[in-house]
Amino acid sequence: MGSNDGDALAALVAKGIRIPPQPAVLMELQRMLQADDYDVRSLARVIADDPGIAAMLFKAARSPVFARGKKLESLDQVLMVIGVKQTCNLVQAMALAAALSDGSRKAFEIFWERSREVAQMAAIIARDRVSICNVFPDQAYMAGIFHECGVPVLMQRFPEYCGALHLDDACCWPSLMEEDRRFDLDHCSVGYLVARHWGLPDFVCAAVRYHHELPRDELGTVCTLVAILQLAIHFYHRVHNVPDPLWEKIGTAVLTEVGIHPDDEPGYFEEISDLFHAGAG
């Protein structure tokens, strides 16, 4: 994390914002990978030490987009079938959901269910478009989980946050201008700092920061990942039969970025939604 990010993080702390630390299981996995001191069995043992994260990992990994029809019965199999790096990316996403939850508040449950659905759709789109977009399913899934992680951080800091911005509905999400006016903060900037603090790849951090726009000034991979996220968010809205106002502004550019002609979009939605419902079953 650079000095500017460090200063911004310190400013958040001064406002009473708590950025969750990485859990022990994630830190140990990162240590083993950096030291190149691991095998599949030793990594599986570390993941198993956190039953909550392990359970969420299994649920995500058994999705057709990752398991590809293979039956996964153990953490060893998850690591072998999906791959070490991809599994660790999924663990990072699961760990964030565990670290930023509050079982006593319904809004957190609504938030993470929404994030998981967007992440799953993003992973399905990334797998389908990988030869064009060069973004892999685990990277898209990670971005899907993290893309609005600033929201639960602000929910923890400001008890009135959900009520003020009408977030008790899974399809009603915050206006950046309204956030800034009421709280002098926005969830994109906060989410970016969480992603940086947790050591996510730079292009994923940038996608978290700019996920409400299509950032043409950023590197191509960032723009492509944001486009995948926006398409997943749009399909999430369509699955739940609610309007998506942002799509009118950036929809054509998003489709162009992922290589889909606007005339083909309805059929593509049907294809992705079918895969999504198959994975959710």
Image (cartoon, rainbow, N blue to C red):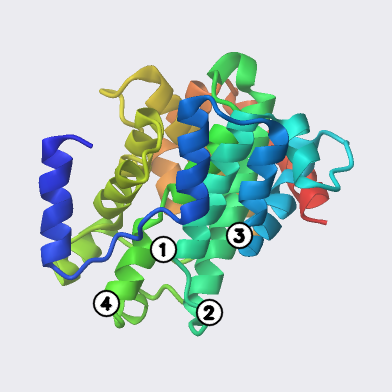
Q: Earlier in the sequence, mark 2 or mark 1?
A: 2
> How far is mark 2 from mark 3, CA to CA?
17 Å
Q: Position of residue 47 (x, y in %)?
A: 63, 50
Type of the residue with mark 1: Trp
Q: Quadrant of the C terminus?
A: bottom right
Q: Earlier in the sequence, mark 2 or mark 3?
A: 3
Q: Which mark is residue 50?
A: 3
> How far is mark 1 from mark 3, CA to CA?
31 Å
Secondary element at image label 3: loop
Q: Position of residue 70 (x, y in %)?
A: 88, 36
Per the image, the residue denoted by label 2 is 103
Q: Pick whichever, 132 or 266, lies toward us.
A: 132
Kindly report which numbered mark, 4 or 2, lies closer to the viewer in this rendering: 2
Please give left or right for residue 92 compared with residue 58 in the image: left
> How far is mark 4 from mark 3, CA to CA?
29 Å
> How far is mark 4 from mark 2, CA to CA?
17 Å
Please give left or right for residue 25 compared with residue 62 in the image: left
Q: Dot 3: within a 10 Å radius of its alpha carbon, few (fewer than 14), some, or many (20 or more) residues?
A: some
Kindly report which numbered mark, 1 or 3, lies closer to the viewer in this rendering: 3
Q: Earlier in the sequence, mark 1 or mark 3?
A: 3
> How far is mark 2 from mark 1, CA to CA?
20 Å
Per the image, the residue denoted by label 4 is 158
Residue at position x 67%, y 48% in the image: 45
Above or below, 101 relative to 83 = below
Type of the residue with mark 4: Phe
Q: Which mark is residue 173?
A: 1
